[in-house]
Image (tube, rainbow, N blue to C red):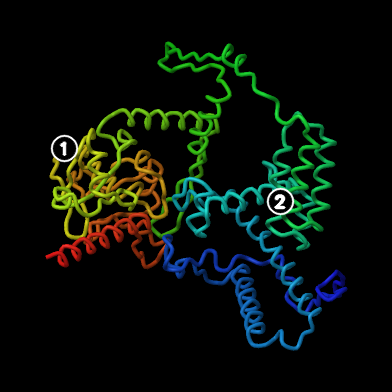
Amino acid sequence: MWRGSGQGLSGTVSWQFQPSFPYILRKQVVIERIFEYNRGMELGDPTATTREPRSRLDEALDRFDAAVTELIGTVETGGLDQLSAEEKVAVWQRFETLRNTLPLVDYNLIADAEAHHLSEEYCSASINQFLIRVLRLSPGEAATRIRAATALGPRSTMVGEKLEPVLPTLAQLQRDGVVSAEKVAIVERAMHRLSRHDLDPEAVETAEQLLTDHAVILAPPELRRFAHAVVNAADPDGPQPVDDALQQDRRYLELKQRRDGMWHLAGRLSNTVGAQLTTILDPLTKPRSTAIEDEDGTVVDIPDQRPQVQRLHDALEEACARLLKAADQPSVGGVPASVIVTISLEDLLAKAGLADTGDGTQLTSDQLLRIADEAEIWPTIIDQNGVPLALGRSQRLASKGQTMALIARDAGCSFPGCTHPPQWCDRHHILDWMLGGPTDLENLTLLCRDHHTHFQQKGWTCRITAEGLPEWIPPRWIDQDQQPHINTRIKRIHDQRQLHSRNRHRRRQNAA
């Protein structure tokens, strides 16, 4: 039994934690059915993840689900009516303590996902994108959880030896349930600013102790101000200033071809160029495992055997390929500054109605005419549902006009959950051109390089619906029923265009 006291709304409050409540679940709590995806998600049917016999994790989830359901039912059916003010505050504080421990499950799930390359298994380029897609998180929330897991989650050496967390004291406070996820984020960000190697280790250690001590007693706004003061005290000079003139004098790059045909690259990059290059190459250097399904249905995971230096080389190769595409018409990347606008011919000639851009926003006909005054115009015929029709090109590569129509329809990578813009996409033949697939819109879709390279290995297939939209069918190891999915961005744009088309038709009928 735990006992404690504090200042409540009506004076001193005392509380105690009884072991009868399933406190032991704190170490076993798992986000409710994280791998039992509902049918609204783009990764498949929850029945596809059911395993027999049931694992300890499934049983723990069942107990947690039952306990939470019982708690909600007790609160909703008058469980608070007979409690005094002090007892209600005690319940509230106890519940908050349990809530604060839930991120411990996140940390282990994230560590396991990274160790087993789960993001690659589900065709996500990074663990951040994986969380955004699976849990429907915002990019900021996903990044916050990953940063917290890195600082407070489990770690191990290359040989599997367990290590304590980067911030062990803060990790223990969260395990005890006395600091919230918001406070953890404040302390983690402050310590990240003090992670430079040129700082005094004793000052950094003192800062960590001060922050963890005050994280328990301060509210988030006060803790945020206190953290700012602690960082300034531990690092009064701030980061060392960059000598731009010296960097400009020392910059150089050599690229020479050797006799064996390979190229030697050496140089010193300025701070800005190095940061830009790192930003471009970092997402492309992630290890990419491959999942292959045997005849008996067993999925075999083949890890990425490339060392980091080779992954960096291949990342540079991919970046160069994308850069070349950006200058090679009629590539998708060759039209990064283009605005794709759809409007009926009669509305344009009559200078009436509204035009729809690729992201679903609208322009008046006057605004469109001003934009198109010095622009290159590619007319695209659309059907009554607002879907661009095939342009009838017979060559293997899609024409510029077809590419424009693909951008207007897909607005980026069409793979479910992917948000890559069109300038980072390839034009993919659903039925391969070598196998007789035509270069028409009903056989084309946009795919980012990662999904274009790996979706077939993962067992996904694509087809065009009766509405003219690309939909994706997952493999049976993800969804036994293989329910098709359409990228939510494409569906949203399509629905907006249908709505606008109906509104225009209604306005014309009313005018007539």
> Disc 1 designates what residue?
395
* Marker disc for residue 445: none
Residue 21 relative to residue 301: left or right: right
Quadrant assignment for the N terminus = bottom right
Q: Quadrant of residue 208?
A: top right
Residue at the image position 81 percent from the left and 42 percent from the top: 207
Q: Position of residue 134 (x, y in %)?
A: 49, 58
Q: Secondary structure at mark 2?
A: helix
Query: At x 79% / y 76%, what residue is drawn?
Result: 19
Q: Identify whether 239 is placed above or below 64.
A: above
Q: Which residue is mark 2?
A: 152
User: Considering the numbered disc 1 on the image, is that residue within a helix, a strand or a loop?
Assistant: loop
**Residue 397 seen in render:** no
Specify the amino acid type for callout 1.
Gln
Which quadrant holds the C terminus? bottom left
Question: Of the residues shown, which amino acid type is indicated by label 2?
Answer: Leu
| Residue 190, percent from left and from top | 72, 43
Residue at image x 66%, y 51%?
149
